[in-house]
Image (tube, rainbow, N blue to C red):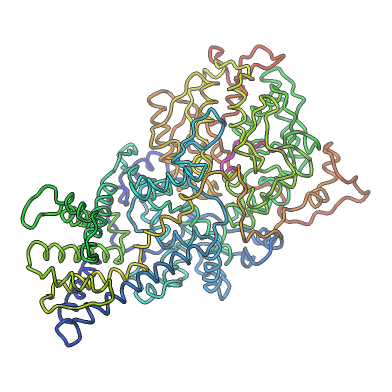
Amino acid sequence: MADTKIEQMSISVAKEPSMMTGAIPRKEWMDVPAVFKPGNYCYPGKKDIVEYLDKNLPGKLFGEPREWKVEEDDWKLPENWKEIIIQGMKERLDKFRSFKVFMDCCVRCGACADKCHFFLGTGDPKNMPVLRAELLRSVYRNEFSKASKILGRLAGAREMTFGVLKEWFMYFYQCTECRRCSVFCPYGIDTAEITMMARELLHLVGVNTNWILEPASNSNRTGNHLGLQPHTFAQNAEFLLDDIEEATGVKLNNLTFNRKGAEVLFIIPSADVFAEPGIYTFMGYLLLFEHIGLDYTISTYASEGGNFGSFTNNELMKKLNGKMYAEAKRLGVKWILGGECGHMWRVVHQYMDTMNGPADFMEVPKSPITGTVFENAASSKMVHISEFTADLIKHGKLKIDKSRNDHRIVTFHDSCNPARGMGLLDEPRYIIENVCNAFHEMPENTIREQTFCCGSGTGLNTGEIMDLRMRAGLPRANAVKHVHDKHGVNMLSCVCAIDRATLTSLMEYWNPGVEVCGISELVGNALIMEGEKERDSGLRFEPLAGMEG
Amino acid sequence: MKVLQALGIVLALMLLAYVGVKVPGGRTLFGVVLPYLGFAVFIIFFIVKVMDWAKSPVPFRIPTTSGQANSLPWIKQNKLDCPSTTSGVIGRMLLEVLLFRTLFKNTRAEIHEGPKLAYGTSKFLWLFGLLFHYSFLTILLRHMRLFTDPVPGFVHALEFADGFMQVGVPTLYQTDIVFLGALTFLLLRRMILPYMRYITLQSDYFPLVLLLGIGITGVLMRYVVRVDVIGIKMLSHGLVTGKPLIADSITGIFFIHLFLITVLLAYFPFSKLMHMGGVFLSPTRNLANNSRMKRHVNPWNDPSIKPHSYAGYEDDFRDFMVEAGLPVEKEPEPKPAEEDAPAEGETKSES
């Protein structure tokens, strides 16, 4: 839980002087230093973790492994750290047109300013996407534009200094790469791209956070970010079969691991087999597959859908993602089905085929139940569970008892990446409407492509910055509160594992009484399974409507 | 403060032109040499900048999807905000470039006691941005009268349409008023809104003040100060045909107007004004959202980056796997496999 009590936080976000509440800063932003204190930064990467990642990737992408403290003035940076940053910038400008164009063509029109959840929750001017980008742009101008270098501050240029580096570390870790600002930018400038570049540069000089690097290194070695070894992973999943049996009376026999020759490889965010409320989503997946008799297997080697590499640099993203195709090939599956996960789908949809394809050893995904060919995944061969399920429902292949979700008054949170990096908006809604009787949308400026981040994506869902997370999550929580008050919404559904973890804390803080679930939990709960017992409780063993007491 | 600096610079430029044409050779310098130079700088460095952007590849397909994607056939795709084909992309880009569609969707957020966040539509930036750009374009096209002989029909038509209210002598062009009005709005917006003032650089004020300078001197010449239009046309048409002649009747205010335009041209390719070219090259807008449907190749993809191999993984955990009944590729050896990688144990996780 956050350090600050909700009563106090409620007053400070709306009343304390900040750019959101109309206060005018006295100093220009270049003259305001970043000051680290407990609660406003993530802990740095552990030395052995950085060593491990460094060993496993070409080049010197993660800087010098060392122990260092964020609050100290000596970060033990390499002597030539400025050179490394500038050189790294040059390389990336040559590799990414996005980076170059976004550095040059911002006019500071201010359309993005109040679109960022971090800005709305903190009122810190450097959380306006335009200023976040200027933190980097100012150095770019100084190094890559002679005219700007001569004009200096008049043209918004400044030297790369340790103070600037601190600023970068602070504010590029107060961005969740959610792309909401990009929707509103007249040139499509995407702060996610800029943050990705800035984080890559920070990594080059060994400035990093452990909450990203340790899960990333776990994912590399054990297959999943939690570091669960194969047997533990499998056992965890199997425990959930007992829970399913207890709740529904049906014993599932369809869960297999690393099975060669299965038709479909199913990849999920590993939190779904481990942490509440993701485990209920997992139970939903399994019930669905049993219901339709899908020939699928789960891999312990590629047991993490989420890609913590994507929060660091392109190389580690590619390396971690590579397991999906490698495992699909080894097992000889026809296509891959992906679970509910946000960043996983950003990577799968926009990067995977380019990074690790071609996936020519698989077939164009075809639902064995309905015969639908997923043309939109013809090249990458990977289908989203919501696409798959929506198709099943449309073809009437599921026996559904909607009333089993009558104790749920549901709203839907569009997870940033599926919404703005994929366009998956109507499939989940179609599913919800077919498995629930009570569904209410949040206000239109807070859903679909305008959805607000949970406030803790891109590896920021760590305990040491709880206050910040509760602030950044405020826009989302506030929209939920609206439908909670108006319609009595008590279930916030989503298609993202980070959401399931972080929204749970966010709801406990801002909106007690609202729970969080994956869509597949609602599906699983509503399925009429063959041989089931008379149902009186849901997958969480909560009483169904009319069964209370 | 920053706006005063910008104003100071523009006033200094005006003074420079005013004084400059009084010294011997000054009229040729400000009337012929610098305009040619300014134009050359504009063309050359505009191209250089665009080529420089184009030189960097687009490694990944990263459109910002602002609507429902192309998915199952019965799910209605938003073909403009989430295009999956080239024609859809062209549609998205056209609406963006011609109508500033994104700005049209702009909102304004406020925080109230509660806390309660509220979002309202905010179309002023869109409106005045659009008015500014289109009146600027119209004025630019109207100026074609000065560079062509005979004057093409569309210029006549434009002049007629622009002055259709038939007010005043000479006829008042609406775009002159709109141009100056929109610029003033855009300038005041930066000066008055606290967050705008905070993010605005001196180099954001400068082009606005410069354009105002150009606009005001232009309006003065048309409606207030008498200038020799025939002489001006002789010079401007001469500049185009390579035989520039400066009539004695041309006065200081024209040289100020011309010099500010020269400065604008020369400044353009090195400034944020390049958003004019950049908008076409933005990878979040000009790509189709079809990255799962069609393979997109990254020219610098590094094939040497491979995933941690399955064999390596099984070597690490084979005994556990066998014990847990998980299938393995290689049967375990009698001696247990060693584990030396550090990334062991479970990550701290919330919940």
Q: Where does the image place residue A197, in percent across and percent down from the top left? A: 52, 59
Q: Residue at x 42, y 67 (%)?
A: B47
Q: Quadrant of the N terminus of chain B?
A: bottom left
Q: Where does the image place residue B284, in percent across and percent down from the top left? A: 48, 50
User: Quick one: A230 or B107, which is closer to the camera?
Assistant: B107
Q: Is residue A517 left or right of residue A356?
A: left
Q: Residue at x 37, y 42 (%)?
A: A8
> Per the image, is A468 magenta?
no
User: Quick one: A508 or A474, which is closer to the camera?
Assistant: A474
User: Quick one: A490 or A186, which is closer to the camera?
Assistant: A186
Q: Quadrant of the C terminus of chain B?
A: top right
Residue A2 showing in the rendered view:
no
Q: Is residue A30 left or right of residue A175?
A: left
Q: Where does the image place residue A83, in percent across and percent down from the top left? A: 54, 74
Res B58 → quadrant:
bottom right
Residue found farthest to the bottom: B24
* Chain part drawn in magenta: A335-345
Residue A530 vertical placement versus A136 (above, below): above
Q: Is residue B344 left or right of residue A194?
A: right
Residue A126 vertical placement versus A158 (above, below): above
> Per the image, is A337 magenta?
yes
Q: Where does the image place residue A364, in percent across and percent down from the top left? A: 68, 37
Residue A321 showing in the rendered view:
yes
